[in-house]
Image: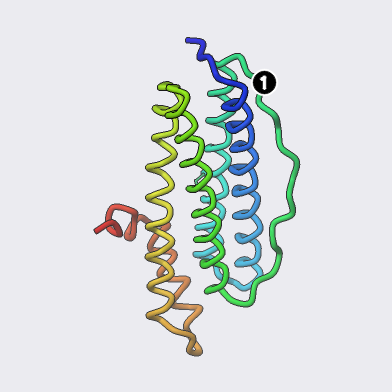
Amino acid sequence: MRIDLSDKMQEALNKQIAEEGYASNFYLALAYWCDNKALEGCKRFFLRQSEEERMHMLKLYEYLSVSDVHPITPGFNQPPADFKSIQEVFSKVLDQERSVTASIHSILKLAKDENDFNTQQFLQWYVDEQREEEAVIRTILDRIRIIGEGGQSLYYIDKEVEKVNTGIINSESTEA
Ligand code: OFO
């Protein structure tokens, strides 16, 4: 089914491709920052996030493609390469996710203003995904705060993040 998208919507969805692509690269950068600190659980977490963000980007390519709109492949923006601590890493992740959430919400508002029901439906998946991602990151940040900054804290933080990787902590268990 071909979907008619306004010029403004085409531009907004193409911009979102760049947002998701950046998020994928950002998480890749974080994975190898963690690798460098021997934080294997955190590395695995960010590698998986990087793959998921790429998948979010590709969903947008497909949506534009079935709408007969040529998706624009974004250039690479340099993600940050260095961080003071794992606490700083996860708080930057929360900032990053909040900014993507704001971007999705603004496209959804545009879709509502334009009575573009197809795009509203398409974006709902992203709204849910963002809510779940933010919930997981907030849980990790809470645990990091509880563990504190003592000598073995990195070891315990990595173990907590590994629980997310294995599904012991997930978005369902974090949403009250
Ligand atoms: Fe694309 O899910 Fe978060 O950013």
- Residue nearer the viewer, 165 or 22: 22
Residue at the farthest front position: 113
- Residue nearer the viewer, 108 or 51: 108
Q: What residue is at 50 percent from the left and 14 percent from the top?
A: 3
User: Mark 1 Cα within 10 Å, few/some/many (few <14, many 20+)?
Assistant: few
Q: What residue is at 33 percent from the left and 60 percent from the top?
A: 169
The amino acid type of the residue labelled 1 equals His
The kind of secondary structure element at disc 1 is loop
User: Is 175 positioned to the left or the right of 59 in the image?
Assistant: left
Q: What residue is at 47 percent from the left and 82 percent from the top?
A: 153
Task: Please tell me in which quadrant of the rendered image residue 7 appears.
Answer: top right
Q: What residue is at 59 percent from the left and 42 percent from the top?
A: 20
Figure check: 6 above or below 31:
above
Q: Is mark 1 within 8 Å of ligand 1?
A: no
**Which quadrant is home to the C terminus?**
bottom left
Q: Position of residue 151 (x, y in %)?
A: 50, 89
User: Is 104 positioned to the left or the right of 73 in the image?
Assistant: left
Q: Which residue is mark 1?
A: 70
